[in-house]
């Protein structure tokens, strides 16, 4: 069993949630809030209760260890959803529990929702106008072929004609090189384009 090291912020936040909710002895809320704060510190936007539900968890804080038998996910989520500090879209709740049993700090949930709306606007926008002949020649010049078989060439052509394009890949797969080629293709289409990286 892995021991989760809680830092002072995790513990303080969890205690604050207990105080605000009037649930001083509620271990289910305390450890959910402490875990949420802990995973946020590790760069995660939310706590997936599924990952911890139904397990015996071990915590360490200031050289003291404690254990928590996390209830099954369904039970844990249901009990959390009844608390005054947990809500859906109510503006006065500091914690959000969504339908997929993910617990968020309201601020991060709002950030995620804003990002989703921005992506939707971009993906639903009209495609960019592009000189197809110039684009094909540019792709062939930069990638060596324009037959649509090279995934990087396809990504570059998509990026030039779309309002939104996401390029992913592991280290060394050519993402940076592809982005440089995309910039060259965009500038070929319109030399006065402004590029921000």
Image: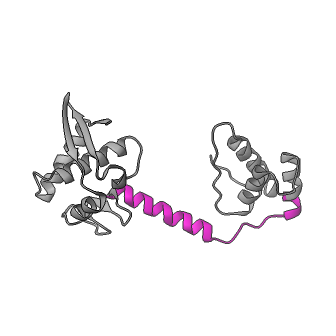
Q: Magenta: predominant secondary structure element?
A: helix
Q: How many marks?
A: 0
Identify the residue shown where x is 68% and y is 36%. Answer: 172
- To which quarter of the image does residue 114 belong? bottom left
Q: Position of residue 73 (x, y in %)?
A: 30, 58
Q: Position of residue 181 (x, y in %)?
A: 77, 46
Identify the residue shown where x is 27% and y is 61%. Answer: 77
Query: Magenta part of the protein: which range?
Result: 106-135
Q: Position of residue 135 (x, y in %)?
A: 84, 58
Q: Position of residue 136 (x, y in %)?
A: 87, 58
Identify the residue shown where x is 65% and y is 58%. Answer: 165
Report the colour scheme. one colour
65 to 113, vertically: above or below: above
State which quarter of the image contains the N terminus: top left
Left or right: residue 135 versus residue 158 is right
Left or right: residue 45 versus residue 55 is right
- To which quarter of the image does residue 149 belong? bottom right
Q: Residue furthest top?
A: 63
Viewer-nearest residue: 158 or 66: 66
Left or right: residue 8 versus residue 157 is left
């Amino acid at each position: 069993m892995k021991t989760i090291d809680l830092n002072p912020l995790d513990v303080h936040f969890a205690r604050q949630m207990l105080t605000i909710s009037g649930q001083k002895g509620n271990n289910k809320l305390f450890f959910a809030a402490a875990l949420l704060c802990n995973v946020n510190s590790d760069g995660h936007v939310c706590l997936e209760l599924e990952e911890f539900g139904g397990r015996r968890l071990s915590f360490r804080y200031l050289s003291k260890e404690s254990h928590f038998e996390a209830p099954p996910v369904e039970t844990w989520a249901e009990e959390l959803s009844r608390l005054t500090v947990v809500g859906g879209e109510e503006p006065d709740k500091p914690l959000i529990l969504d339908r997929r049993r993910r617990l968020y700090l309201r601020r991060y949930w709002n950030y995620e929702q804003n990002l989703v709306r921005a992506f939707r606007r971009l993906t639903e926008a009209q495609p960019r106008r592009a000189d197809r002949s110039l684009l094909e020649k540019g792709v062939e010049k930069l990638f060596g072929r324009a037959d649509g078989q090279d995934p990087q060439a396809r990504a570059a052509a998509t990026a030039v004609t779309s309002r939104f394009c996401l390029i992913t890949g592991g280290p060394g797969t050519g993402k940076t090189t592809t982005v440089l080629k995309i910039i060259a293709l965009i500038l070929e289409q319109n030399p006065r384009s402004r590029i921000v990286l």
